[in-house]
Image (cartoon, rainbow, N blue to C red):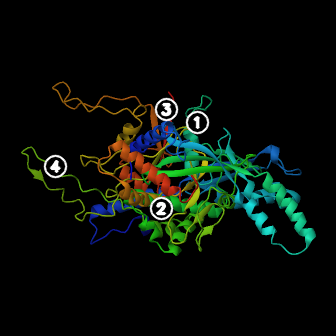
């Protein structure tokens, strides 16, 4: 658990660290700290490709023997995969006032501005998670079996007030703390400790979503 | 007075003071539950299908504060189909594309309770120069109903009742977490009970709702007062008419109260709200607000020491820049946060504090 001011300090330090050390890590370099009222947050924009297109080309090549049909499919999929469809995602790391931990919020749009549905999001390279059997994806939330909160659901950005998808922060804190205990060193100062904790957080969330 | 309005007290016989507390708790909870707001819904004239009966496209409803817009859609739809639309238009209605906005252009959220939408609108008017002077009667909230092209940038959640229920349950669990550090009280409810609490909202049934809610809402029992030091320096024991058992599930035993503060047209604040301050006294509304919004709620200096000329001095007045509205009622500054949290909270467990600006 962090306090809000620790989150702000860790975020600022993380942005500074990854900005000024180019070979260090490109993964965290494009995050920016937005000092908004009343609560600051990290933000960046990223593009992803949609899986479904490359998958549909694989599927259709296994279709029946009708050469006419196959040819048609092939030319159609060749056409679509050549103009790969991009998904633009605005991503935010906000501080969850309820759970006192960072939480990942994001939006996902096609290049023409239409919002993606939950199914479409789960079908992009943004989503790395293998969905376990018994999960429930009902259009507005993805809930794993036997977990009190949905893994992915909709909520308003705490500062901007705009609707986003967010990864439920409830379980990440424990996971991050466990991992962090492994890497932590006694001689770190407070700032180093906070930055490393946040980096561990990014790594944990990175197991679910492609960060 | 229904027994379900109060939280079941642990332990033995209730003292007369407990019974009074129970009565008041039940009274306020009932009042909050029965509160309604007037809403006027008008279809955007530009979107009225051809052959609609114009002039009748306005629907008035006195809606429960604890209800939600998606729950009103069925009756709005029935009205439009019966009165306004002709058959061709009615058959092409796509409720999933409906959305509402206020006259000022604010898009109304599906997952906010109607009472909050109303109060939030009322405070936003306090910062507009065109706002009419307030009258004794509550003016209706005028909403424009659009039938197509929902703005997905600003309003993602679908208008379905299922989505609304899930958002509601999420809020209930968050409130639980804030109070106790875990969600086990809510998640420990049987599925039937969890569904039952939502059904209580859908059907607007106080008893059905509180039958389950009483298991997860703290009781409103008084805090055990801190021991008083007498002039001789001895510590006196707590007053004998306070409840002798420490109420582990009481309002003053929570670690934090689920509160959100809404500013006019503005952001929403969520801060740590302990029931008791460091000196053991109850946290009050004014203390909480002057801590986080000191410019609107300046900290009150204490009264000057008594003198011969003024044996009973009052603390100096501070300017009344803003007012606080909870469940549509302007709240006194000395109200205790813990009490507000269990008697004036919304059905989702959250205390919504709307701050308006005084116009003088």
- The answer to whether residue A97 shows anywhere in this view is no
The residue at the point 70 percent across, 61 percent down is B74
Are the residues under badges 2 and 1 in a single subunit? yes
Q: Which mark is residue B228?
A: 4
Q: Is residue A141 left or right of residue B355?
A: right
Judging from the image, what secondary structure is the residue with disc 4 in? strand
- Residue highlighted by disc 3: B358
Depth check: A118 or B336 in front?
A118
| Mark 4 / mark 1, whichever is N-terminal | 1
Q: Which residue is mark 1?
A: B125
Q: CA distance from mark 4 to mark 3?
A: 39 Å
Do badges 4 and 3 share one subunit? yes
B279 vs A177, nearest the viewer: A177
Tell me the residue that label 2 is attached to. Answer: B173
* Vertical side of B340 occupied by B304: above or below: above
Nearer the N terminus, badge 3 or badge 1? 1
N-terminal-most mark, 2 or 4:
2
Q: What chain does badge 4 belong to?
A: B
Residues flagged by tags 4 and 1 on a common chain: yes
Residue closest to the far left: B232
């Amino acid at each position: 658990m962090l306090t809000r001011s620790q989150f702000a300090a860790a975020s600022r330090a993380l942005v500074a660290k990854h900005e000024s050390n180019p070979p260090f890590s490109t993964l965290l370099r494009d995050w920016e700290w937005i000092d908004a009222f009343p609560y600051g947050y990290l933000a960046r924009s990223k593009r992803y490709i949609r899986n479904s297109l490359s998958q549909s080309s694989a599927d259709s090549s296994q279709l029946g023997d009708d050469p006419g049909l196959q040819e048609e499919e092939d030319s159609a999929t060749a056409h679509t995969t050549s103009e790969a469809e991009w998904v633009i995602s605005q991503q935010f790391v906000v501080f969850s006032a309820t759970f006192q931990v960072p939480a990942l919020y994001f939006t996902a749009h096609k290049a023409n501005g239409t919002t993606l549905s939950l199914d479409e999001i789960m079908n992009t390279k943004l989503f790395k998670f293998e969905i376990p059997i018994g999960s429930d994806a009902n259009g507005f939330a993805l809930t794993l079996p036997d977990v009190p909160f949905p893994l992915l659901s909709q909520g308003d950005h705490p500062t901007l007030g705009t609707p986003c998808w967010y990864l439920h922060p409830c379980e990440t804190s424990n996971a991050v703390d466990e991992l962090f205990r492994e890497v932590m060193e006694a001689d770190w100062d407070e700032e180093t400790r906070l930055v490393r904790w946040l980096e561990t957080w990014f790594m944990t969330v990175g197991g679910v979503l492609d960060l | 007075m229904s027994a379900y309005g109060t939280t079941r007290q642990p332990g033995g016989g209730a003292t007369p003071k407990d019974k009074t507390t129970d009565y008041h708790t039940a009274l306020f909870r009932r009042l909050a539950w029965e509160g309604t707001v007037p809403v006027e819904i008008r279809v955007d004239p530009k979107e009225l299908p051809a052959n609609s009966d114009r002039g009748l496209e306005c629907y008035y409803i006195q809606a429960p504060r604890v209800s939600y817009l998606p729950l009103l859609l069925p009756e709005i739809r029935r009205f439009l189909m019966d009165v306004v639309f002709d058959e061709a238009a009615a058959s092409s209605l796509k409720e999933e594309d409906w959305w509402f906005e206020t006259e000022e252009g604010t898009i109304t959220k599906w997952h906010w309770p109607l009472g909050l939408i109303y109060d939030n609108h009322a405070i936003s008017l306090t910062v507009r120069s065109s706002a009419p002077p307030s009258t004794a009667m509550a003016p209706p909230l005028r909403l424009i109903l659009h039938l197509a092209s929902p703005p997905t940038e600003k309003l993602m959640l679908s208008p379905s009742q299922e989505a609304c229920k899930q958002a509601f349950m999420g809020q209930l669990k968050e409130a639980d977490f804030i109070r106790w550090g875990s969600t086990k009280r809510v998640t420990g409810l049987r599925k039937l009970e969890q569904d039952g609490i939502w059904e209580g909202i859908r059907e607007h049934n106080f008893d059905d709702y509180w039958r389950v809610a009483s298991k997860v809402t703290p009781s409103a029992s008084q805090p055990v007062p801190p021991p008083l030091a007498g002039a001789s320096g001895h510590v006196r024991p707590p007053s004998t008419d306070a409840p002798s058992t420490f109420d582990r599930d009481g309002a003053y035993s929570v670690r934090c109260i689920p509160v959100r503060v809404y500013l006019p047209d503005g952001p929403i604040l969520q801060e740590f709200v302990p029931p008791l301050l460091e000196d053991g006294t109850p946290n009050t509304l004014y203390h909480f607000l002057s801590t986080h919004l000191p410019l609107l709620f300046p900290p009150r200096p204490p009264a000057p020491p008594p003198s011969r000329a003024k044996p009973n001095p009052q603390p100096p007045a501070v300017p009344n820049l803003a007012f606080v509205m909870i469940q549509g009622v302007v709240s006194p500054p000395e109200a205790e946060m813990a009490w507000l949290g269990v008697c004036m909270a919304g059905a989702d467990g959250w205390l919504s504090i709307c701050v308006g600006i005084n116009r003088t």
